[in-house]
Image: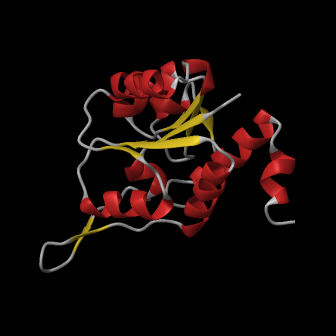
Amino acid sequence: MIRLLILDVDGCLTEGKIIYSSEGAELKNFNVKDGFAIKEWLKMGHHAAIITGRDSAIVAHRAKELGIEHLYQGVKDKRSVAMQLCAKLGVDAGEVAAIGDDLNDYRLLQWAAQAYTPRDGSEYIRAFAEVLERCGGDACVREMIEKVIRTNGEEEKFLSQWI
């Protein structure tokens, strides 16, 4: 059973574009459907982490808004950070699903029990990860979470919160 989701930001939670205002402020566009699914995943008693290669106050704000306690920014070796987090949480690699879209996610995704990538992920990642129907920033994280919930056999638990 998957107990921990590891999420990349640029290209997964966002469409991968970095927009700057005329004042130099960085802007990111998050999909509310991803946020909804992440919050429900956490309500089900599971863990979620963001591990990203860039540093952004916007990402810290989004993580806090969603209730994601495990936020790691400016990370070069995502797999190493994920392994340390698993040790801290008492989760093994067989209980981890991760999503990433580019080469800096490669080692993490090969290590995770379930690896996902958006439809527009790198061809090197698409070669071994489950390719989602949606592109980065277009609720691909929601799609991944729904697949994980079904694989976990928790669909009824997930839906019972609303139906």
Q: Is 84 left, or right, of 161 in this rendering?
A: left
Q: Is 107 left, or right, of 5 in this rendering?
A: left
Q: Position of residue 132 (x, y in %)?
A: 63, 44
- Residue that appears at 14% across and 80% down: 22
In front here: 110 or 49? 49
Residue 51: quarter of image: top left
Relative to 145, is 60 above or below? below
Q: Position of residue 96 (x, y in %)?
A: 57, 28
Relative to 111, is 10 above or below? below
Q: Position of residue 162 (x, y in %)?
A: 81, 66
- Residue that appears at 61% across and 19% down: 94
In front here: 139 or 7? 7
In front here: 160 or 35? 160
Q: Image quadrant for the N terminus?
A: top right
Q: Position of residue 54 (x, y in %)?
A: 25, 47
Outermost residue to the left: 23
Residue 23 visible in the current orientation:
yes
Residue 46: quarter of image: top right
- Residue that appears at 47% across and 25% down: 86
- Residue that appears at 58% across and 51% down: 141
Q: Is 145 left, or right, of 109 in this rendering?
A: right
Q: Image quadrant for the C terminus?
A: bottom right
